[in-house]
Image (cartoon, rainbow, N blue to C red):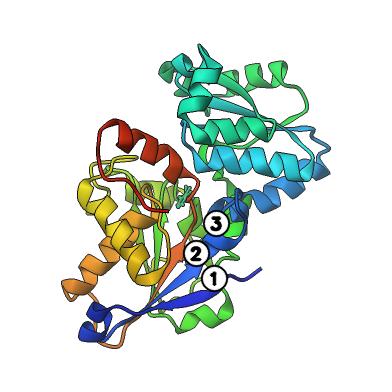
Amino acid sequence: MISQNIQISLPILKEKEVSLYIKREDLLHPFISGNKFRKLKYNLQEAKSQNKECLLTFGGAYSNHILATAAAGKEYGFKTVGVIRGEELGIDLQKTFSQNPTLKQAHQFGMEFLFVSRAAYQQKNDVTFLTLLLTKYPNTYILPEGGTNSLAIKGCEEILSEKDTEFTHVCCAMGTGGTVTGIINSSAAKQNILVFPSLKGNWIVDEINSLKPNKQNWQVIADYHFGGYGKVSEDLITFINQFKNQTNILLDPIYTGKMLFGILELIKNNHFKKGSKILAIHTGGLQGIAGMNLLLKQKNKTIINE
Ligand SMILES: *Cc1c(COP(=O)(O)O)cnc(C)c1O
């Protein structure tokens, strides 16, 4: 499956003589969107071949991966369990669902939740904790937080197609790094892969290296996390609304909004040579807008226009 590349036209692109395209991975599926579809594909096949009945995974309360797993379970015939960070969310489920469209939707897809404390959640990769979970939920296929494992990377190697080698730069937002590792693996050595982390931290480069990308043609652009994971500013929200008005493409506030903000800043600051051809991957994540808007409304802030 190959997503379409849409050319963006904005005055700044003309002025700086660069071209910008967006790969519409966000259109792959309404709930299993963008890179989460790619990351699940081979894992679902593996779970089926192991005759597993259930998928279990980990995430925060607004996680795109949690919702994607819930939707995939419903579509492909698995029970699903979400281990969610924040035990307070389990106290009054109806209240939680009324305030959290992600968990409400995942619940509607049949996902069962295990709400755990932040301390317990830290053990998400510990063998003893995972063994305990398998006792509670037997015959279960465990996906790590964010869905990143070697099969997920293999799926993400299918995001770029051979025709995409015409781009000088490929830009991708990063959480756990699985997606961009797949992109690096299937890129051409002459291309520059720009990684836009949605998190703050100096461990990002090590994290990507730990996933063993097959080339060194990548660079981390660390200046556009907007204060850290899940943090947004008025400027970012205004940018997302403006971008939607200008291009008719909706961006999410956690990943793709920050990346595109960064790309356009880099263009303004002459980071790209004249004639550069930039491809930005729209990894999806649009389901998170409703939850973000509820939080913004509570604080009387500008919301994202869908
Ligand atoms: C999860 C996600 C990412 C990050 O993917 P990783 O493989 O965890 O780096 C990027 N964009 C969107 C929209 C996502 O949902």
Spatial CA span between label 1 and label 3: 13 Å
At 62% across and 71% down in the image, what residue appears?
2
Q: Is residue 56 visible?
A: no
The picture places residue 152, in percent across and down from the top left corner, at 60, 51
Q: Is mark 3 within 8 Å of ligand 1?
A: yes
Spatial CA span between label 3 and label 2: 13 Å
Q: Are marks 1 and 2 in contact (CB under 8 Å)?
A: yes
Q: Residues within 10 Å of mark 1 (few under 14, many from 20)?
A: many
Q: Residue 190 vs residue 135: left or right?
A: left
Q: Please give the residue where the numbered disc 3 appears in the rendered image.
A: 34
Q: Is residue 207 above or below residue 262?
A: above
Q: Residues within 10 Å of mark 2 (few under 14, many from 20)?
A: many
The kind of residue tagged 2 is Ile
Q: Are marks 1 and 3 in contact (CB under 8 Å)?
A: no
Query: Sequence-wise, which precedes: disc 3 or disc 2?
Result: 3
The kind of residue tagged 3 is Gly
The kind of residue tagged 1 is Leu
Residue 183 bears which disc, if any?
2
Q: Nearer the viewer, mark 1 or mark 3?
A: 3
Q: Is mark 2 within 8 Å of ligand 1?
A: no
At 28% across and 51% down in the image, what residue appears?
237
Q: Is residue 138 above or below residue 54?
A: above
Q: Residues within 10 Å of mark 3 (few under 14, many from 20)?
A: many
Helix, strand or loop for disc 3: loop
- The quadrant of the picture occupied by the N terminus is bottom right
Q: Is residue 183 visible?
A: yes
Q: Nearer the viewer, mark 3 or mark 2?
A: 3
Residue 160 bears which disc, if any?
1
